[in-house]
Image: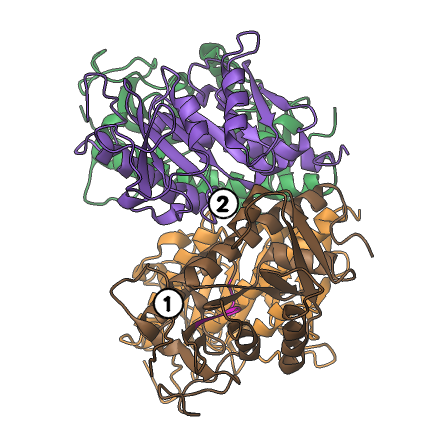
Chain colours: A orange, B green, C brown, D purple
Amino acid sequence: MTTDTEVTSSPSHPALAGAERAIAELQETGQYFFQRGWSVGTSSNYSAVLNRSPLQLVVTASGMDKGRLKPNDFVRCNYDGVQVDTDNQPTTDQPRSSAETLLHVVLARLEDVGSVLHTHSVWGTLLSDHFSAEGGFEIEDYEMLKGLAGVKTHRHVESVPIFDNTQDIPKLAEKVDKRLHDESLPPIHGFLIRNHGLYTWGENVAEARRHIEIYEFLFEVLGRKLSAQGKLCNNA
Amino acid sequence: MTTDTEVTSSPSHPALAGAERAIAELQETGQYFFQRGWSVGTSSNYSAVLNRSPLQLVVTASGMDKGRLKPNDFVRCNYDGVQVDTDNQPTTDQPRSSAETLLHVVLARLEDVGSVLHTHSVWGTLLSDHFSAEGGFEIEDYEMLKGLAGVKTHRHVESVPIFDNTQDIPKLAEKVDKRLHDESLPPIHGFLIRNHGLYTWGENVAEARRHIEIYEFLFEVLGRKLSAQGKLCNNA
Amino acid sequence: MTTDTEVTSSPSHPALAGAERAIAELQETGQYFFQRGWSVGTSSNYSAVLNRSPLQLVVTASGMDKGRLKPNDFVRCNYDGVQVDTDNQPTTDQPRSSAETLLHVVLARLEDVGSVLHTHSVWGTLLSDHFSAEGGFEIEDYEMLKGLAGVKTHRHVESVPIFDNTQDIPKLAEKVDKRLHDESLPPIHGFLIRNHGLYTWGENVAEARRHIEIYEFLFEVLGRKLSAQGKLCNNA
Amino acid sequence: MTTDTEVTSSPSHPALAGAERAIAELQETGQYFFQRGWSVGTSSNYSAVLNRSPLQLVVTASGMDKGRLKPNDFVRCNYDGVQVDTDNQPTTDQPRSSAETLLHVVLARLEDVGSVLHTHSVWGTLLSDHFSAEGGFEIEDYEMLKGLAGVKTHRHVESVPIFDNTQDIPKLAEKVDKRLHDESLPPIHGFLIRNHGLYTWGENVAEARRHIEIYEFLFEVLGRKLSAQGKLCNNA
């Protein structure tokens, strides 16, 4: 079902529309992330908002090889993370959605989020471990920060919260939701889960993808710097 | 010869069957592993089970370039590692099989093993050296562990045994066989040979390949962590 | 407008001429640099001189994905960095040029510069931070230095100035211009901006691209050496 | 001119013969090495023996981009390193051969050498610097050593001599020639030039290429090990 609040995606597949376009963009994203080593071993999951009201997303099904996603490797879900058909009715007639679907939903409910990307990288894993006791870290003074939406200067200070890893996704989704709406804390473009991976998002797949690139670049810079200093994961 | 216990492989080559499909999957696996730097210099060998009873495998012939395997670069062998023809009769009318064929056979005899993959990576080599005195090491608390078959939580503790390197493959195969059937020790998904490489397996080529990706990711994380701490290969 | 002082580019696109050829070369350069990780997250910008007198350049428009540049992702500008049409008349009928266009112009005014390339790499970022207090560093005794135009021996000493990062591009362009024309200092083939990136140039796109490769290779060598010595970014 | 002692190359281009095949193999080798980062910035040079008696080689011309070598980027030379035409007569009607042609010739004169490959890598550069005072180093106890022609066990000890870098190629060629024929020293499969690069060879292009892969793998293992130990380039 597409309505008057249908979300349009980035222009990389101009000939396609709606779900077909979102799926094509996420397939291509998977090939690229897999090749960079950020989505190996069937890790990671990706989603795109198809419709804003009522909320409907496509999200990768559980356990698929991200380097060669097929159109059938995606499922639809609604505002509550329940799998739905094209008419937004609950269905069980699909592969099982990713266990982490609720995290995608919590993020996709935000007004300006059109896509959520979750990846697993070596440097992100190392930093998530290194800074876990502090619950996060800050990145500042890098020109690359300007690749995050709305950032206009390298003077920007970006907070990267780290959540403890858990298999209790509803509980984690609740914590993430709370952090996102806590106006006493600085707004964020992404977060890490300890020894697990990165979540980031954007107004469309292209922007979310750019955010992954920015975070991965900065994680590698910080990780190599801490490593050279003999500090990385050496604070225990 | 294909029988009623023929093993079917993963769905990446749906149009092919039996040996043709297994070979196509292993060729593609070789291109991919070569490009990642895990199978350079004609190192590594790969196998897939064609038939369960009597056991018959295809395994890479000795000394082939894994980045461009041709269908003729594979040979068949039986339960004892003897090269056989399509009717499971001993033959010498093939290229020589890999010197390490017996290791593949010992693993392929396990009921739920449909493919065995052996690779040589930089991080695996370094860890196999670092932990050789202890005879192995444990990996725990990483989300990526869930990519190993049957693992349901990052709390899982995976043992990675390390065997001393040797050119006496029958003796090594015996040690591996003993470890696999020692019920006093935790079950494993793979092992290292010191300053040599990794063996892992799965119910089909896709699963064994996923296991390689999981191990290589975790080896890089552990290796970079130990390196940053100034510990890697510094315990002598 | 093409005149008798039209600049011809490298021979990689012999069938194309003028702006079409320059754009094709820069598109291909973007794909290559993106794949190497030197131009991710829509960072970087590239230019080529189309005409010497009056000076006219093509330069990448602001914020484009360098891995998939399209012909429309380039704009033209003149000696003063003002966007112009094919007849060299000021125009606003184009996407906005890169914020750093003035740096390209300052370099392109040099007689023997036919192309300017700006990239963002991890090792360049780390070195630009490490040596920022000294305002730069020297590279010598490497055979790869001979890849810089006019260098005939590994004994060559190449100065790499580092400028503080700023969002005030006209001011930075002025500093760069001053350094380029300061005859009391050794001539240079490139410079770094702190925690930002590398600028280099050449008589055509191929030479500027070769210079990027040379600098990135040498930055990685120096960065790994300082890292192993425990010195990298450890001087504070 | 092809004679009864014409050298046949590896089977990767079965439809081609003689010079055409050698050039096709070296072009493909250049693309591959460039992509691995071992031949960037127009560094490196490659050769293959076309005829044994009289000796005739094809060798890369000076200063070509190794990632996109064209058939015209190769020249022929004879036993003395003089450029010759297809009838083995001295000629000046070709691009200039690489400055290091004499090194190729000294190696190609060895009876069982059909191809010589020279590359520039980051880890090779770092090791050539680290061990330069000792004039070389030894590699032993790695399974990957078995990828060097004739090596049957990981117990093998391979000597890697390091020569000082120089622009005086005839003098360097003389030193290399002396080392190759010094029967008091162990035979070698390759050598390094300090802060410059690696030379290796094989009976054909495929074998020389395999040797490059073996050395690069082992250099990375040794380099990362020394780096983790805080020793790399820290002996001054």
Give the chain of mark 1: A
Highlighted magenta segment, given as a residue range = C39-48
- Say if the magenta span includes residue A150: no
The N terminus of chain B lies in which quarter of the figure? top left
Q: Nearer the viewer, residue A192 or D202?
A: D202
Q: CA distance from mark 1 to mark 2?
A: 25 Å
Residue behind mark 2: B147
Q: Say above or below: C227 vs A202.
A: above
Of all residues, the one furthest to the right in this rendering is: C236
Residue behind mark 1: A25
Q: Residues within 10 Å of mark 1 (few under 14, many from 20)?
A: many
- Regarding residue C4, the answer to whether it shows in the image is yes
| Main secondary structure of the magenta stretch | loop
Q: Is residue B3 left or right of residue C118?
A: left
Q: Are marks 1 and 2 on the same chain?
A: no
Of all residues, the one furthest to the top in this rendering is: D184
Q: Nearer the viewer, residue C21 or C181?
A: C181
Q: Are marks 1 and 2 in contact (CB under 8 Å)?
A: no
Give the chain of mark 2: B
Q: Say above or below: D37 vs B55.
A: below
- Regarding residue B206, the answer to whether it shows in the image is no
Per the image, label 1 sits on a secondary structure element best described as helix
Q: Is residue C92 left or right of residue B7?
A: right
**Quarter of the image where one finds residue A164:** bottom right
Q: Say above or below: D178 vs D47.
A: above
Q: Say above or below: B159 vs C221.
A: above
**Kind of residue at disc 1:** Glu
**Label total for image:** 2
Per the image, label 2 sits on a secondary structure element best described as helix
